[in-house]
Image (tube, helix red, strand yellow):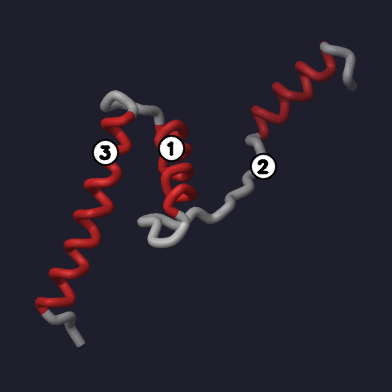
Amino acid sequence: MSPTNAEKTAKDAGVFERQRKLLQLLDALGGSAGNLDFQKLLFLYCQELSSGAPYDFVPYKSEPSRSRRMRIAASSSSAGYL
């Protein structure tokens, strides 16, 4: 069953609104931002709104890469922690 024109229009309006908010946030950062900085600002913006936030954030925990773990171990060892 395909969506009606009204459903498509409502969905498009929601997408447009979210895109507009993203551009406003990017403008607040001077028009350019790194991925992580932009995600942090977007997270804080959504926390401020609480209800009706345009995005949901799901905690993500990842382990550091093997090379990162090796660098941490090497620096900890040279600092006398290991």
Where residue 47 appears, as percent x and y from the top left, is 49, 49
Mark 1 and mark 2 in contact (Cβ < 8 Å)? no
Sequence-wise, which precedes: disc 2 or disc 3?
A: 3
- Number of marks in the rendered image: 3
Where residue 29 appears, as percent x and y from the top left, is 34, 27
Sequence-wise, which precedes: disc 3 or disc 1?
A: 3
Where residue 6 appears, as percent x and y from the top left, is 12, 77
Q: Is residue 36 above or below residue 6?
A: above
Q: Residue at x 18, y 69 (%)?
A: 10
Say what amino acid the circle numbered 3 marks: Gln
> 10 Å neighbourhood of mark 3: few (<14), some, or many (≥20)?
few
Q: Quadrant of the N terminus?
A: bottom left
How far apart marks 3 and 1 lie (CA) works out to: 11 Å
How far apart marks 2 and 1 lie (CA) works out to: 23 Å
Q: Residue at x 73, y 24 (%)?
A: 72
Q: Which residue is mark 3?
A: 24
Where residue 66 appears, as percent x and y from the top left, is 67, 34
Left/right placement of residue 20 relative to residue 62 reads left
Q: Residue at x 17, y 63 (%)?
A: 12
Say what amino acid the circle numbered 1 marks: Leu
How far apart marks 2 and 3 lie (CA) works out to: 33 Å
